[in-house]
Amino acid sequence: MNNKDEFKSGFVGIIGRPNVGKSTLINSFVDEKIAITSDKPQTTRNKIRCIVNRKNAQIIFIDTPGFHKPKDPLGKYLNQAVESTFREVDAIVFVADASEIIGRGDAYIANQLKKINTPVILVLNKIDKIGKNKLKSQIEAAKERGRFTHIIPLSAKTKENIIELLDSVCTYMPAGPKYYSDDMVTDQPEALIISEFIREKVLNLTSEEVPYSVAVEINEIEARPNKDLTDVFATIYVERDSQKGILIGKGGTMLKKVGQQARFDIEKLLGNQINLQLYVKVKKNWRRDERTFQQFGYNQ
Ligand code: GDP
Ligand code: MG
């Protein structure tokens, strides 16, 4: 085997301000929903890993929660998770929103990235929302903000230029083994993805403090014998009684909506009919209590 045919593999961290489309990008790589998306900032809490197989290469992408000023112990934990990702990876994909001003928040991240030697590919996402001229000026603006080995405009939504990004990422992968079998798109346990689906619906259906106060725990996933039906029992935790009221809604309408939408995603994931039972419980101020948020899985 000559050098050119050598198998390559490596890890790539995805970073960027909230809402620029990091999770959408992850999902576009694998044609399957594994990372939840939301128009509310700071909602990715776990490092979601997605596995992309190409001819002669395997790339493992890590979707990090965005950097932000920590407001509570959970926020501090999330920042540490981002920093450790920077140190582990072979390349970084820095995502910015091409339809917005490339501004201070992006510059903050670009400056953090200057401190490390890892190659940084800048993605200008959401080009479906802008014209050619605007894109040109955005590329110029981005060049002023930092040192990037590549700048790739794309749309995570329409998938325009996704292949170009993967090609570019591949050039930075070192020779290495195939870590995961071809049929795996993520190394996240099913229960975690399911809990994220449920959390996503709460994020998208509620407002103000509720989205940030929610944690979801999967209590049981069990297939019924000889039936195309799986029972999923999950508990949604909030921090206050008032939030519990909002989440359940008048006559249980809100919780019902959350359940219906989540069930749709879970059925697609498991390829099975789902009976989803949701419970709501109050755990006062869980975001401040390290032991509790570790129990909810924020402990990598
Ligand atoms: P994250 O916070 O960076 O993970 O951002 P998300 O992936 O959750 O996306 C934030 C919002 O931007 C969602 O409403 C997405 O549907 C939307 N979005 C993401 N990528 C694109 C894109 O390429 N084009 C457009 N028009 N919208 C996008
Ligand atoms: Mg996200």
Image (cartoon, helix red, strand yellow):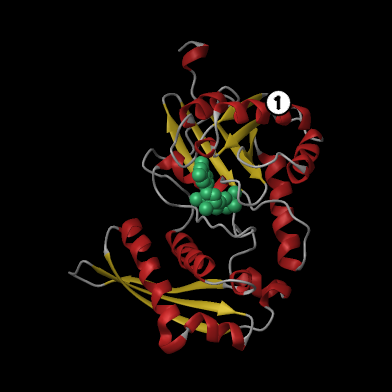
Q: Position of residue 185 (x, y in %)?
A: 42, 45
Residue at x-position 66% and y-position 31%: 138
Check the picture and name the quadrant holding the C terminus. Answer: bottom right
Image vertical order of residue 292 relative to residue 261, above or below: below
Image vertical order of residue 41 relative to residue 3, above or below: below
Residue at x-position 57% and y-position 30%: 153
Seen in the image, is 192 located left or right of residue 274? right
Comparing 280 with 156, the one in front is 156
Q: Position of residue 56 (x, y in %)?
A: 44, 24
Residue at x-position 71% and y-position 66%: 74
The residue that label 1 is drawn on is: 140
Seen in the image, is 99 located left or right of residue 145? left
- The answer to whether the beta carbon of the residue marked 1 is less than 8 Å from any atom of ligand 1 is no
Q: Secondary structure at mark 1?
A: helix
| Residue type, numbered disc 1 | Glu
Check the picture and name the quadrant holding the N terminus. Answer: top left
Seen in the image, is 231 located left or right of residue 56? left
In the image, farthest residue toward the left: 226
Residue at x-position 51% and y-position 80%: 247
Q: Position of residue 108 (x, y in %)?
A: 79, 43
> Which of the 4 quarters of the picture holds residue 174?
top right
Q: Position of residue 107 (x, y in %)?
A: 78, 40
